Image (tube, rainbow, N blue to C red):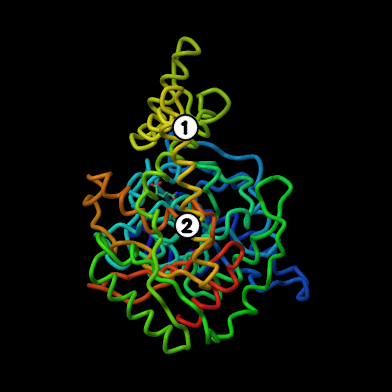
Amino acid sequence: TEDSFKQIAKLDGKVQAFLAVTEKEALAKAESLDNEPMDKRGPLFGLPIGIKDNIITKGITTTCASKMLENFVPVYDATVMDKINQAGMVNVGKLNMDEFAMGSTTERSAFKTTHNPWNLNCVPGGSSGGSAAAVAAGEVPFALGTDTGGSVRQPAAFCGVVGMKPTYGRVSRYGLVAFASSLDQIGTITRTVEDNALLLNAISGVDHRDSSSASQQVPDFRAGLTGDIKGLRIAVPKEYLGEGIAEDVKESVLEALKVLESLGATWEEVTLPHSKYASPVYYAIATAEASSNLARFDGIRYGYHPEGAKNLEEIYLRSRAEGFGTEVKKRILYGTYALSADHHEDLYVKAMKVRTLIAQDFAALFEKYDVVIGPSSATTAYEIGGVVQNQLTLYANDVLTVSVNLAGVPAISVPCGLSNGLPVGLQIIGKHFDEALIYKVAHAYE
Ligand code: GLN
C-alpha cells in the first residue's frame, strides 16, 4: 500500500488517474490487517486496489466524474466493496472516468482528463480510463472498472493491461451507479491474467440485493491456468478484421492467432451477420435505459442542488442543466426520444428485437467453437483532443465491444503487441459463464 502511494505521488501529477486518494484510511486499514490471523489471509490479502468512481464507497466521495455528484459521500458500500474488504484488500482511492461512464476516452470527466501512461499525449480509453491508466502506471496492481459497452476492455487495450467484462449477472451490481442496467457489469483490470482471475474470484457470486445476479457456481478461475489449449476451436468473425479496423491492429491480431495455433488451437473465419447493427442498437438501448436511470438526479434527494432556486420546477431544470455535462444531456435526450410514445416502436422495440438476433449470432457460433477472437478496439489510443471532436466516430468505434454486452457474454482484453509505441488489445469472447476458459486461453497466450 505504501508503494502504491509512492508511485501515485511520483506519477499521478502527469497521469491524472485518481479523483480521490484515500491515503490516511488506506494506511490505517493496512496497519489493522496485520492483526488478522495467518490462516484467515486469502490470496489478495493486504493488496492495494483502485476503484472506478461510479462504484459506491461508504464514507468516500463517489462522483461518477460528474458535477451532479461532486460532493456525494455514500452511507453504504457496494457489494463488490464488501467483497474486496472480505478479501483483505485495501482501497487506495477513486479513479477517473467519463461522466456517468458515457464515453470512450475519459475526456468526458467533469473534473480532469486522464493521460495514457504509454504516451501522455494520448487518451487512456474509456470510460474506465482512470482504472486502466492507474494499473498501467504501476500505481495499483488491481482496479475495478465497469463495462456497459466496452469500458473495461477498450481502456485495457489502450493501456496495455488485462481487462475482463464478466458474464452479465456474474458480479453484483448493487452499489454500482446505474447507466444502462441491462448491460452494466463491473469488471477487473490488472497487469496479468492470473491476477485478474484472482480478483474476479473475489468479487463474483450471487447477491440477494441484485436480482439480476446469477446463482451459477463460481469456479476457481486460477485452477484452470494450465497453459494447455490443445484442440481449442477459435472463431474469428470477418466483421472484426474487416473495414474500419486499422492495419496495425489486424496484423497484431493475426500474429496472436499464429501464437495460439502454435499452442495447438485451430481457427476459422466466421460471420456475425448482425454485428453491423450493434452500435445503433446499443445506443438506442443504452440511452433509453440511461434516460430512465438518470431521472433520479433531480436536485432534491441528493447531488447537486442549485442555489437560490425559487420553486420545484426551477430546482429540476437548473439542477440538471447545471449538474450534467453535454454528453450526458445528449444521451438523456436520445433515450427519452427512443422511449417516447411516437417512436418507441421503431426505435426501442426494434432495437430490442435486433439485440436478440445479435445474441443468437453468438449462440450459433458457440455451438461449434469454444471462443470468439478479434481485436478489442479498431485502433490504438487516440490523441487527446483528437477524435473526441467527432462523437459519431467514437460511437462507431464501439462496434467491437458492444455486441458482447448486448449478448451478455463474457470477454477479456489482453495485450497483443505494440504499434508505434502504443499497445494493441486482443479480445477473447466466451459463452455465458465460461470465464474460466477465457482465462485459460488468455493465460496460455500471455
Ligand atoms: N463507449 C461506450 C459508451 O460511450 C461504452 C461505455 C461503457 O461501457 N460504459 O457508451
Q: Position of residue 55 (x, y in %)?
A: 55, 48
- Seen in the picture, residue 270 relative to 392 is either above or below; the reply is below
Question: Residue 90 lies in what quarter of the image?
Answer: bottom right
At a point 62% along the width and 77% down the height, the residue shown is: 222
Residue type, numbered disc 1? Ser
Q: Which of marks 1 and 2 is in front?
A: 2
- Seen in the picture, residue 446 relative to 65 is either above or below; the reply is below
- Determine whether the residue tagged by mark 2 lies in a helix, strand or loop: helix
At a point 40% along the width and 76% down the height, the residue shown is: 268
Mark 1 or mark 2, earlier in chain: 1
Image quarter in which the N terminus is found? bottom right
Question: Residue 317 lies in what quarter of the image?
Answer: top left
- Determine whether the residue tagged by mark 1 lies in a helix, strand or loop: helix
Q: Where is residue 259 in the image (x, y as percent from the top left)?
A: 40, 85
Q: Which mark is residue 93?
A: none
Q: How far apart are marks 1 and 2 (CA)?
A: 22 Å
From the viewer's side, name the closer residue of 179 and 16.
Answer: 179
- Name the residue tied to disc 2: 404
From the viewer's side, name the closer residue of 61 and 411.
Answer: 411
Q: How many labels does the image show?
A: 2
Q: Where is residue 375 in the image (x, y as percent from the top left)?
A: 36, 67
- Name the residue tied to disc 1: 291
Image quarter in which the C terminus is found? bottom left
At a point 48% along the width and 24% down the height, the residue shown is: 305
